[in-house]
């Protein structure tokens, strides 16, 4: 974050402190009225500069807070977008993995079915039988019905045979080889030996040479069926191993893809952590800037308060000086008035005293007519009396 104060605001702050210091020194050191006026003006200018700096720093702090809030919103939106993208990628990877496993399973099953069909064809060519696959449950149900239906004619034919000579009686007019071949069921290459129970034998009879040949053929067919079953098992085992190998390769590829995705997710998480660290660093710088702005505002407020205090103190001192000067003037006027009154009283007293003496002198110097006549009579004439004196 760039420093929003700039050199101009720093110069104003320095000028504010200088004016406040000058005003403080002048008010504390000198008592000159002119210097006091200069100190008051400096304090007022420092207060004005303090108001300006406080407003500017407050505006810068609000703008920085708005910018920080906007950056936080952008970062939160970006983080949310990254999380959504990460979840979508995880879901896509999981879906791809499941589809790959499903395709792999389907391919493996298709290969196994193809190999089983091929083995059935080979067994059919070797044995001359049809090894077409049918569901076991449906096949067992059909066999049971066939056995029940075949058992009823056999039981009906065996009932009159108790009173007749012992002869082999077949359930149908077919040769023993056809009966054995058609009646023997199979399940995946295995012959059902219980099918021999459907052949009715009379007591005391022996098998014919044709039946011995059929038994030999069945034994050969059993041997070939066992060999075919072993081959089928070997082929199924090979197919299973191949399927397991293919599955292992697919799982390995899926694990590698998951590891790559995990590494990418970790990289994105590290990048998000780096962004959060950068945001925290920016927030720390913002806090430091706000603290610095608050400190400067506090210093400006303190300087303003100090200037106001100095101004109030200066005004109080000026008022005290004016009151003292007015008191001195009034006292001087009172003293002067008293001195004038005292001088006037003294002059009046002197004038009064001078008038009394003059009257006394006049009274002392005055001669009544009787005394004058008396003196004139005693001295004869005033001239003679004045000469005598």
Image (spheres, rainbow, N blue to C red):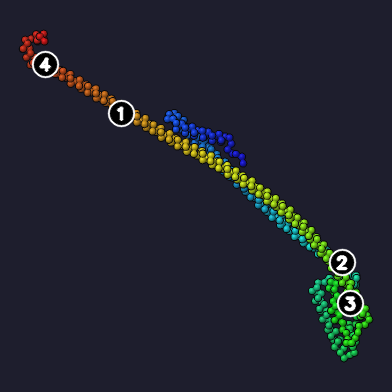
Tell me the distance, in whole angstroms, between the alpha carbons under discs 4 and 1: 50 Å
**For residue 204, side relative to residue 272 (left or right):** right
Decide: few, some or many residues near mark 4? Use Cα within 10 Å; few <14, some 14-19, many ≥20: few
Tell me the distance, in whole angstroms, between the alpha carbons under discs 2 and 1: 147 Å
Residue 177 versus residue 262: which sits nearer the camera? 262
Residue extending furthest toward the bottom: 163
Give the numbered dot on residue 367.
4
Residue 86 seen from this side: yes
Give the numbered dot on residue 334.
1
**Is tag 4's residue or tag 1's residue first in the polypeptide sequence?**
1
Decide: few, some or many residues near mark 1? Use Cα within 10 Å; few <14, some 14-19, many ≥20: few
Decide: few, some or many residues near mark 3? Use Cα within 10 Å; few <14, some 14-19, many ≥20: some
**For residue 284, side relative to residue 320 (left or right):** right
Q: Name the residue under label 2.
A: 118
**Image location (x, y in percent) of residue 366:** 13, 16
Say which quadrant the N terminus sits in: top right
Label 4 SS: loop
């Amino acid at each position: 974050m760039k420093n929003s104060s700039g050199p101009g605001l720093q110069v104003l702050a320095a000028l504010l402190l200088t004016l406040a210091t000058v005003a403080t020194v002048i008010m504390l050191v000198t008592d000159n009225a002119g210097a006091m006026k200069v100190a008051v003006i400096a304090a007022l200018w420092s207060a004005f500069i303090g108001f300006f700096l406080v407003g500017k720093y407050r505006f810068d702090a609000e703008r920085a807070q708005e910018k920080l809030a906007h950056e936080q919103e952008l970062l939160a939106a970006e983080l949310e977008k990254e999380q959504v993208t990460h979840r979508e990628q995880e879901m896509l990877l999981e879906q791809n993995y499941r589809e790959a496993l499903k395709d792999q399973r389907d391919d493996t099953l298709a290969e196994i079915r193809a190999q089983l069909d091929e083995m059935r064809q080979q067994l059919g060519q070797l044995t001359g039988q049809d090894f077409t696959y049918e569901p076991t449950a449906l096949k067992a149900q059909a066999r049971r019905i066939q056995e029940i239906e075949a058992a009823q004619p056999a039981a009906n034919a065996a009932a009159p045979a108790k009173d007749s000579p012992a002869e082999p009686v077949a359930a149908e007019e077919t040769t023993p080889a056809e009966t054995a071949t058609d009646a023997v069921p199979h399940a995946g290459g295995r012959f059902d030996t219980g099918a021999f129970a459907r052949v009715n034998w009379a007591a005391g009879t022996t098998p014919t040479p044709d039946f011995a040949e059929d038994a030999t053929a069945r034994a050969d067919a059993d041997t070939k069926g066992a060999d075919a079953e072993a081959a089928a098992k070997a082929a199924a085992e090979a197919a299973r191993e191949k399927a397991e190998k293919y599955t292992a390769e697919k799982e390995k590829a899926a694990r590698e893809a998951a590891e790559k995705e995990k590494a990418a997710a970790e990289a994105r998480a590290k990048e998000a952590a780096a962004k959060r660290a950068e945001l925290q660093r920016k927030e720390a710088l913002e806090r430091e800037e706000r603290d610095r702005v608050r400190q400067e505002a506090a210093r400006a407020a303190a300087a303003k308060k100090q200037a106001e205090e100095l101004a109030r103190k200066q005004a109080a001192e000026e008022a005290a000086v004016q009151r003292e000067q007015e008191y001195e003037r009034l006292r001087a006027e009172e003293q002067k008035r008293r001195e004038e009154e005292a001088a006037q009283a003294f002059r009046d007293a002197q004038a009064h005293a001078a008038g009394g003496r003059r009257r006394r002198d006049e009274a002392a110097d005055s001669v009544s007519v009787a005394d004058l006549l008396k003196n004139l009579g005693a001295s004869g004439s005033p001239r003679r009396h004045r000469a005598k004196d």
